[in-house]
Image (cartoon, grey):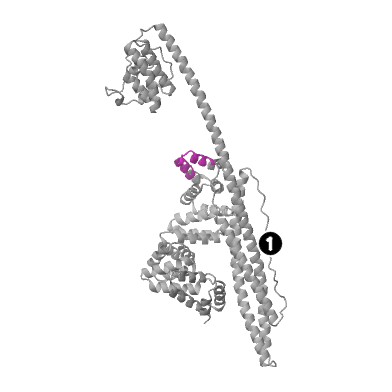
Amino acid sequence: MSRRHGSGSRGRKWGPPEGSSKEINELALLLRSWLTSTGNTLNSFRQQLTPLHFHAGTVPSLGTLSERFKGKKLDWEFTQTVADVCFHDHTGMTAALFEAEELWKRHCQNPTPVDIDGARAVARSHAHVTRKQQETLKVQHELIDAQNLLLDARQNELELSRYTFTLQKQLIVAQNSLIDSQKAEANSYQLVLLLLQIIHSLTTSMFVFKRDAERSQLSDSEKGSLQYLLDQAATRRDRAIAEKEAAEEEQRAALKGITQAQEEVNALQYELNTLGIQQDETASTRGLLSVPVQGRQVVEQGPSYIEDIDRALSTARRVNQESEELTKRAFAGLQSIEPPQPALSSLVTTGGQVATKILMLRLEGLDREAGTLVADASRKLDVPGLVTLLQQFREAGAPADRRLALRTVCRRRSTREMIELISRCRAAGQHPDVVSALSVMSAHSPAQTLPAIAGSLRAAGLKAEALMFLDEVGHVRNDFIDVLARFEKAGQAKDCGPIYDGACRRGHREILDLFSELKGEARNRLLLAMARRISARSVPATVTEMRARRLQRNADRLLELIGQHRGSWLLPPVLKALRGAKLGREALRTLDAARSRKDGSKDALLLALAHFNMMEDHKRLQR
């Protein structure tokens, strides 16, 4: 029935209305225009009807509905039903029903007899009007679409400009950090060479002074003068050794800063190049600052020689301080750089086929499909393909996809493939991917495989990565005690040291939870690692928590170990932190334990205390 009447359910045209009056036919044509203008067909119209639309409580068949739209048995209830389905806003429905009500009232009060030819003319007129309305609506929609495209283009251009400005600003910060790190490294390198000359010169002088003092023909006053010079030279040599150690530490920190800053500069320049913005290369800054004092090659005995050494050591202290400030400024700059969110246009130009498809799925909100594709690609791609995939994810700012890919590789691929992936990422300079891969392996690998993974990393020549892996195992594993037992059983007890060190990166309460579970030698090893590794700021909280847990002896032992084994330049901040927490007695216990240090380490600690202007502690340590 519906097909024969051309109900519009399959795109057919309506037939002429067959109502009992001109008004009802015009009303039927009006109802048809509502359906057409809102994109409904007879089928879609019926699917939206509910029993509540009708007093009878049932939805009519398609045939009955077709008859109504032809004007047969058309009533006001049906008119209201059509308006309810076609118009979802109150204003539009009210306006439509106002026009329909006029026709319905005229039909009820003074109907005009039907003229078949006239009805057909009216139908043709309404069909013509409907076509015009459809054409007008189509033009309006096209205009709106064009306006939306223009707005989107302008918005994308604005976002790209903001993104580029952010990249350029961060590139300047990264370049300045690189320059500061290079300055610090150059200063420290030259300072180490100078101090080596000074140490050699002092050692030679001490030999000469001692040899001359042992001559029998010298008077007591001459021997006393030589002994005084010998003592002064020995003190200066200890200071020079401490300064050299500090310079070497600053050089290592500066080299770390150079690596990180160079990675940031490379990443930001690559992103800007991808967007078509060329940047000037950063000029090399090695040797921008030189140490103005040169070591003597010939020993000049006497007070003037000691004065020259004092001036050289003062210069060394100043250069060390300057290098430390440069390094701090460089790392502060690097920490201020936040990974910007890539512009929409760059997301699809920096990746290959797989990464591009995944990112487009994310943009379309199809996260489940994107996750499935990431897992599937991680299982099927070869190792070089995985390296490229990780690089593209990192460039596109998709850390979640990068980590999902690494977890899938860790769980579904062999240890050999995972280690090959780490090796290739390191060779390609993708240090963040190396760190992420080691983190995922340490967290998600079965406990029984951890010793073999550490051994395989070393066998592949990845010794530094093996230490990072063990440190991360200690940091993240919940089965800490079981992991230690497995390394012991595998004959890799030496690997437990980095694991204990990694455990000290946890919160102080979590560390003490582990400490309470350990027994015997394992507990002592963790306590020693805590003494060397926990931060100065966490020492007071750790000691206080140990007392609260009735671990007083262990707390005292921790303070003694800190005094004996903490780095000379790292102990003064611990003492300050303890006093700041009103734990003065604990600070004195720690300082007293430092008296058992060897001569060289003790002298370096005295120098550090003087550097931090802690003269009371300096005097106490000298007693």
In the displayed structure, would residue 215 be above or below residue 125?
below
The span shown in magenta is: 356-375
Which quarter of the picture shows residue 24? top left
- Coordinates of residue 563 in the picture (x, y in percent): 49, 74
Q: Residues within 10 Å of mark 1 (few under 14, many from 20)?
A: few
For the N terminus, the quadrant is top left
Which quarter of the picture shows residue 260? bottom right
Q: Is residue 206 magenta?
A: no
- Coordinates of residue 579 in the picture (x, y in percent): 46, 71
In the displayed structure, would residue 83 be above or below residue 18?
below
Relative to the observer, which residue lies in front, 193 or 180?
Answer: 180
Q: Do we see residue 282 in this rendering?
A: yes
Relative to the observer, which residue lies in front, 97 or 360?
Answer: 97
In the displayed structure, would residue 152 be above or below residue 508?
above
Relative to the observer, which residue lies in front, 486 or 4?
Answer: 4
Relative to the observer, which residue lies in front, 340 or 478?
Answer: 340
Amino acid residing under circle 1: Leu
